[in-house]
Amino acid sequence: MVRINSTRLRANNRHPSIVAHYCYLLFVATLGLVFCFYLMLSSQEAKMNSIRMVVNAHSASSIASSGKPFLLYGTAWKKEETARYVAEAIHAGFRFIDTACQPKHYNEAGVGNGWKAAADELGLQRSDLFLQTKYTPYPGQDPNRVPYDHTAPIEEQVKQSLAVSLKNLHTDYLDSLVMHSPLDTVERTMEAWRVMETFVDDGKVHRLGISNCYDYNFYTAIYNQARIKPSVLQNRFYAESNFDTKLRQFCKEKGIWYQSFWTLTGNRQALALPQVKHLAEKKNLTPQTLMYAFMMSLGYATPLDGTTNKAHMLEDVAVMERMQGGEKIFETQDELKEFAAILGMPEL
């Protein structure tokens, strides 16, 4: 007679239910992991969609095509800190960047490194940024650090300068190329301009401009002779040039971007006046951001902003975004004219 171990039998009888129990737990745990993974992916996708929406809202190409006002981040005199400041400016919301192929005052390669770093961190594309640089004629260069062969013909100097800029800025095209200053005659200026026009023909440059040109007749002579018209004039904005009254009117009539630099420095005394401070406080601005708002309110003017202060970057971008959102900082033409009178401007 075979004796059956009842304890072992009971254990064997429980074994299938234990296996089933553990299988159920494993199934539930797997299901939970899958659900958590799904939630993580959904969260990441939502985050990416949010980033895409922000990027699209702050893309230079969409801003420029819409005709909305904007600030241009200026990079002169930032030396070895250029890359850091450019990256910080882009993180703050700047999308339009100005520099020059002029080692004397600009670190163009630093601009290239700065925008690339910020773009990688924010998920921006090249087209989300507007890069503008300048060909600087030899008189404006440091003789010991000329970025091209200054003994070569002007045509070759301009070509070499562009090649250096494209390399420095890590790009195969420029949104804008500006002649840093006219040459000594209209004829020699046009010689360089003709070369710059070929860059537009080749798709390497999208628009052309001139800087530091305060002579109305000189500028209009270039405009009239140019096959590809200048669409940028970048000048110092201050009383000594009568605020470029005739040139600004010409820009307004021809749809030329008037880019102002020295916008704050050249008008420091006016911005310190009590009535300006009162008006700024009334509009929840500082005198400095009020000045930028005034320039952008003209409809054809774009101020350069070269601040290195993070808080000021955010303040400046905030007023720009208020205006891009449709807010009229200066509600009437009379208000614009009143502020212009404080500055000493004869006309808007």
Image (cartoon, grey):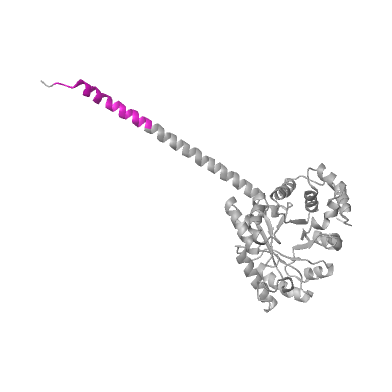
**Residue 333: image location, x then y, percent:** 86, 49
Magenta stretch: dominant SS? helix
Residue at x-position 42% and y-position 34%: 31
- Does 17 lie within the magenta span? yes
**Residue 66: image location, x then y, percent:** 71, 52
Q: How many marks?
A: 0
Q: Nearer the viewer, residue 278 or 157?
A: 278
- Does 248 lie within the magenta span? no
**Residue 109 placement: quadrant:** bottom right
Residue at x-position 75% and y-position 70%: 226
**Residue 307: image location, x then y, percent:** 72, 54
Q: Is residue 196 visible?
A: yes
**Residue 261 placement: quadrant:** bottom right
Magenta extent: 3-25
**Residue 297: image location, x then y, percent:** 79, 51
Q: Nearer the viewer, residue 211 or 262?
A: 262
Q: Is residue 34 above or below residue 231?
A: above
Q: Quadrant of the N terminus?
A: top left
Q: Is residue 331 visible?
A: no
Q: Which residue is farthest left? A: 1
Residue at x-position 62% and y-position 65%: 168
Q: Quadrant of the C terminus?
A: bottom right
